Amino acid sequence: MRTVYLNGEYLPEHEAKVSIFDRGFLMADGVYEVTTVLDGKLIDFDGHAVRLARSLSELDMGNPISKDDLLEVHRELARVNEIDQGMIYLQITRGAPNDRDFAFPPKDTPQTIVLFTQNKPGLAENPVAKKGIKVISIEDQRWARRDIKTVQLLYPSLGKMMAKAAGCDDAWMVEDGAVTEGTSNNAYIVKGNTIVTRNLGNEILHGITRAAVLRFAREAQMNVEERAFTIAEAQAADEAFITSASTFVMPVVEIDGAAVGTGSVGPIATRLREIYIDESRKAAV
């Protein structure tokens, strides 16, 4: 039985209840973060806290918990749920007014804050990283502010199911002929010693893992280009991979049925995964 956090209380998961009038439920009026736990410690917590504050600010939403208190809640949930490797999910909504209304509720409406853990033993040693994943391309039909990490995840969910129906693992979304990102991850290709990934903007989520991986890549003397690329360019690349809090660096070996490079996991994605996991463990809190 998991212990979860809801509005200041630690509760057994079956006792945690949220109002049917909560705007996260009715309007997807909420933001979220997912922080990785390795060896019982938090990876990139500061980055997630900063992005959380930005997402809330972009939606004119208050922040109901301080960074220090948030860190303590994360640590306590990892401790009581005995999470060695896994994830901690956080969601903050605008709260539950007395009735449904498109207009925002009064500023003093109590917000809803929820955190829960997901136990994932072997996360760092995921065998999929040795063989890579296959992706398909789909049209990007999300709203225009993907830089805000909102709970509006229906289209990414549909994209995951499209990939599953095609016998693949994920989908890369394409807008105006260029790849934006994966359904829950940032997308990359490798040509020679150069890593190419979409430049930051409203079109993609500003990935916390993305920022760390690009920093490590530059420190390892790899070239990085932040620009748009096409599916055809990706299919002709030497390697491809994705990054996210739950996958770290995950090689992509096939795109729309075409093998990337040799069709097997390449050296740069492999090395970046090793570096990211090693360095993240050293800096974990």
Image (cartoon, rainbow, N blue to C red):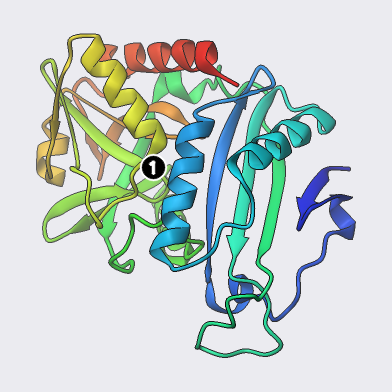
With 99 as the anchor, is 170 left or right in this view?
left
Q: Which residue is drawn at 26% across and 15% down?
A: 268
The N terminus lies in which quarter of the figure?
Answer: top right
- Judge by depth and name the residue closer to the eye, 85 or 172: 85
188 left or right of 97 in image: left
| Camera sees residue 162 | yes
Q: In this view, does 186 lie above or below 239?
A: below
* Residue 62 falls left or right of residue 143: right
> Residue drawn 81% across and 66% down?
17
What percent of the width, then of the height, locates residue 282? 52, 10
Which residue corresponds to the image point at 14% horizontal and 52% vertical from the top-left? 178
Note whether residue 149 is visible. no
- The residue carrying mark 1 is 185
The kind of secondary structure element at disc 1 is loop
The picture places residue 240, in percent across and down from the top left corner, at 25, 29
Residue 85, x across and y down, in percent: 66, 24
Q: Quadrant of residue 71?
A: top right
Which class describes the residues within 10 Å of circle 1: few (<14), some (14-19), or many (20+)?
Answer: many
Q: Nearer the viewer, residue 161 or 205?
A: 205
Q: Which amino acid does label 1 sit on?
A: Asn
